[in-house]
Image (cartoon, grey):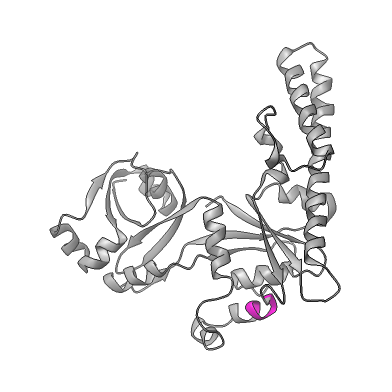
Amino acid sequence: MALQVGIVGLQNAGKTTLFRALTGAATTGRDNVGMAAVPDPRLAQLAETVGAKKVTPAAIRVVDVPGTGSELLGNLRQVDLVLAVLDGWSGTRDPQADEEELTLELLAADREHVQRRIDRVAKEAKSGDAKLRAQVANLERLAAHLENLQAVSELGGDVEIPPELELLTVKPMMRIVNGPGGIDLALEAELAELPPEEASAFREGESALAEVVRTLAQTLFLITFFTAGEKETRAWPLSEGRTALDAAREVHSDIARGFIRAEVIRWDDLVAAGSHTEAKRRGLERVEGKTYVVQDGDVLNVRFNV
């Protein structure tokens, strides 16, 4: 998936620790990019039903956003959701105050970003182009809103937000307090590096971050479809409203190129039937074309020819 989550936080809040906890990566550095598995109990049931030798969960791309100052803010514009880490562990910071500071930084960055765009477009508008003058007027209304320290997400309908601006305060934001009253990220990072069986011996139930990852997927408007075979059963994230052809493209470009039809069955129908063969016998499987809108929980088998 192209969608990605960017982790930010003030110094020593636990930014890289959260990245390690989410992805299981032990490395650090400027290019921290990894995948956070999305917990889904349906996957294990499907894998057991078809006797899968390999089980692969859906995953979200996570970035420990590199850089400082303007470089960091520029990199942050490339992500789809901001995951803010707040210091609740050191005893020297107030998480709420840190959140307000981060929000003000994002507002200030957007204000400067919009002003630079105004300066550029205003020069071009001197030619008398009506469309360019309208752009300047719209950007000035946007800048005035930001001057009042109001997030762009709070704008009324009188201001258009050019998508190419990639404004930070348009992006959804989630917050995690690192420490008491939140999540012990240092512990979660250590457990993430262990084999699942060993990690489960240290905790009751699933990871404290499991619900966070599920919420990230929901906030990004992701659904999950499955491919269920004996060789591998896998969960795939897909944006809501996407088609069977889009799903095929996620699996492999060749499958999308040679798409013939998609055989579709609900995950719980397949589990109840006990096998693909029995599901077909019961009439639970149907055939769909390229434009079929994939639903959360669909199991797809795409027939193709290349």
Q: Image height check: is 169 above or below 185?
A: above
Main SS type for the magenta part? helix
Q: Which of 305 and 100 lies nearest the eye of the viewer?
A: 100
Q: Image height check: is 190 above or below 65?
A: below
**x 59%, y 71%: residue:** 209
Instruction: Using the rendered image of the protein, determine whether residue 166 is visible from the camera's viewpoint.
Output: no
Image quarter of residue 98: bottom right
Count of numbered badges drawn on the protein: 0
Query: Is 37 left, or right, of 70 in this rendering?
Result: left
**x 34%, y 74%: residue:** 53
Q: Position of residue 168 (x, y in %)?
A: 72, 46
Q: Position of residue 281 (x, y in %)?
A: 13, 59
Instruction: Using the rendered image of the protein, determine whether residue 209 is visible from the camera's viewpoint.
Output: yes
Query: Is 257 left, or right, of 32 in this rendering?
Result: left
Q: Image height check: is 141 above or below 192?
A: above
Asked whether residue 2 is drawn in magenta, I would say no
Image quarter of residue 140: top right
Q: Position of residue 131 (x, y in %)?
A: 70, 16
Image quarter of residue 91: bottom right
Q: Which of 37 and 71 lies nearest the eye of the viewer?
A: 37
Asked whether residue 187 is drawn in magenta, I would say yes
Q: Quadrant of the C terminus?
A: top left
Q: Which range is magenta?
A: 185-189
